[in-house]
Image (cartoon, rainbow, N blue to C red):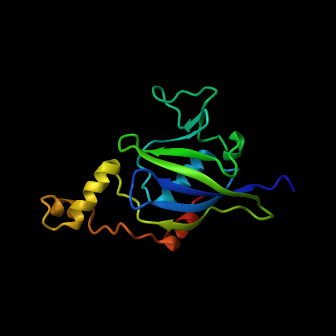
Amino acid sequence: MSNQPIILEMKISLRDIHPRIERVFRVSDRITFRKLHEIIQIVMGWENYHLYEFRYGPYRIGIPDDEYFILDRTHLDARDTRIGKIGIEMDDAFTYQYDFGDDWQHTIEVQYSYRSFGGSVKPECINGKQACPPEDVGGSSGYSRYLIELADPNNENHTQSLGWRGLFEADEFNLTAVNERLKRLR
C-alpha cells in the first residue's frame, strides 16, 4: 500500500492583503513544483505571466537561468523536483513568490496529509476567499490603491482604474469555475 501517493491538503494565503485572500486545495505529493505552480496559478486566479520561486527550509525551487537561479544542492529545478522529494508533510509551511517585480508573497501551509487509496489524484480546490488581485497592479500597496480608486467615483484615478480592468469585485471567488479550470489542467 505504500506505493500509493500521499494527498496533501494545503492552504495558500497571499501576504500583506486585507481582507485575506486564501484558497484550500488538494494535490498529490508526486507532482513537481512546476505543476504545483500551475495549480496555484489556477486556484489563486493569477494569469501565469511572471517568474516564480518556492522556498522550503534551505531549498529554493524554480526555473534555472544564467543569472538569478543556478542549480546546486539547495537550488532545485521545479520541472523535475517532486513535492515528496524534499520531505514536505503535514504541518509544514513554505513560501511561493510570484512576479518578482510586484513581489506577491504567498504562505502555503500543509493542513492534512493522507494516503490515497486507489485511482489517480486530481488537484481540487476545496474553498477560497476573495478575488485574486489583477496582474501588474503594483503589489500589495498598488492593489490597495487600486481598490480605493475603484471605490471612490470622485477619486482622480477612478476612471482610469475602471478602464484598466473593468468592473472588479474584490470579494468574489468562484469555486466551481476554479475546479473546471483544474479539470482541464494536464
| Residue 68 position within the rendered picture, expressed as x and y whole percent measured from the top left | 46, 29
Q: Residue furthest right?
A: 1
Q: Residue drawn 24% across and 61% down?
A: 148
Instruction: State the image coordinates of residue 163 (x, y, percent, origin top left).
Output: 21, 63
Question: Which is more toward the observer, 65 or 166?
Answer: 166
Name the residue at 50% across, 30% down: 69
Using the image as rendered, state which of residue 54 and residue 141 is in the foreground.
141
Relative to 67, 117 lies left or right: right
Q: Residue at x 71, y 42 (%)?
A: 87
In the depicted structure, whether residue 147 falls above or below residue 59: below
The quadrant holding residue 56 is top right
With respect to residue 67, does 20 lie above or below? below
Q: Residue furthest bottom?
A: 176
* Rendering quarter of residue 74: top right
The quadrant the N terminus occupies is bottom right
x and y, in percent, of residue 166 in the image: 26, 66
Residue 104 on image: x %, y %? 42, 47
Residue 127 visible in this rendered orientation of the protein = yes
Name the image quarter holding the C terminus.
bottom right
**In screen coordinates, is 149 left or right of 109?**
left
* Residue 136 in sight: no
Figure disc tally: 0
Give the answer, above or below, for where 103 lies relative to 123.
Answer: above
Q: Residue at x 66, y 63 (%)?
A: 122
